[in-house]
């Protein structure tokens, strides 16, 4: 089974201006993710798509296959808007979609995910995706959803709520096109924890993840 990597990003960002190219620990989130994918030896090819000329040039110099984005898939497009388009431009039948907003994800976690995906029972699961187990007191607009008001447990004993974390998504090309997404209806869940599970969405996330990233890389040199 051949699996390729796919990294996609765009210039526009609502909460963090120029998030994809904003300086992050002497580099940027996209370059970090490209270099991480290159360190995974299990990918048949690595595809890249963005509307940022500098990143496209960098990706091509590194040997990635460029998928040119159409104008309608720029701006405020979501994964459901452009995932099928990207999948149709990939040769391989299975795709590992990696987000550049997860700089603390480990190469070993990606390799473990690929190994696990290849052994999946596809009659039971249709994708492999990273998740986080949420142990918080959660409410909808009216009432608690994971505990009873009159019998509040300790937080560690709460019933688990699973939060999809887009760090890694492995799914067939055919199902991406069918679902317009990189997660299936029956995902196999790989659980990741902080700091590895950082998904940068706000400036607070950005600064905190950068602090952990710098500290981790400094300790590697000691």
Image (spheres, rainbow, N blue to C red):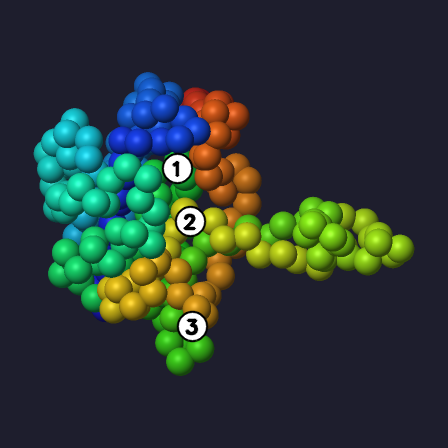
Image position, residue 216 (x, y; %): 46, 28
Label 2, on which residue? 166
The residue at the point 43 percent across, 58 percent down is 129
Give SS at disc 1. Answer: loop
Query: Image quadrant of residue 14?
Result: top left
Q: Is residue 68 above or below residue 210?
A: below
Which residue is at a point 24% across and 58% down the rendered structure image?
A: 84
Asked if disc 3 and disc 1 are in contact, CB closer than 8 Å, the reply is: no
Q: Are marks 1 and 2 in contact (CB under 8 Å)?
A: yes
Local SS, label 3: loop
Write the residue at 35% across / 58% down. 182
| Residue 42 shows in the view | no
Q: What residue did someone put label 3 on?
A: 125
Secondary structure of the residue carrying tag 2 is: strand
Q: Quadrant of residue 99?
A: top left
- How packed mark 2 is, by other alpha carbons closer than 10 Å (few <14, some 14-19, many 20 or more), is some
Please tell me in which quadrant of the rendered image residue 80 appears.
Answer: bottom left
Q: Quadrant of the C terminus?
A: top left
Residue that numbered label 1 is attached to: 101
């Amino acid at each position: 089974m051949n699996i390729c990597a796919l990294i996609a990003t765009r210039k526009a960002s609502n909460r963090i201006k120029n998030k994809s190219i904003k300086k992050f620990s002497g580099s940027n989130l996209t370059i970090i993710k490209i270099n991480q994918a290159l360190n995974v030896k299990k990918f048949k090819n690595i595809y890249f798509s963005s509307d940022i000329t500098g990143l496209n040039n960098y990706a091509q110099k590194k040997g990635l296959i460029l998928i040119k984005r159409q104008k309608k898939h720029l701006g405020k497009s979501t994964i459901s808007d452009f995932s099928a388009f990207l999948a149709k431009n990939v040769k391989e039948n299975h795709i590992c979609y990696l987000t550049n907003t997860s700089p603390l994800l480990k190469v070993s976690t990606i390799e473990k995910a690929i190994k696990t995906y290849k052994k999946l029972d596809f009659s039971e699961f249709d994708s492999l995706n990273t998740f986080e187990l949420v142990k918080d007191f959660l409410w909808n607009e009216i009432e608690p959803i994971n505990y009873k008001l009159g019998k509040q447990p300790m937080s560690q004993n709460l019933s688990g709520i699973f939060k999809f974390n887009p760090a890694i998504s492995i799914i067939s090309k055919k199902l991406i096109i069918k679902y317009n997404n990189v997660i299936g209806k029956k995902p196999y869940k790989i659980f990741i924890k902080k700091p590895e599970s950082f998904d940068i969405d706000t400036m607070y996330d950005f600064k905190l993840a950068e602090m952990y990233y710098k500290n981790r890389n400094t300790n590697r040199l000691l």
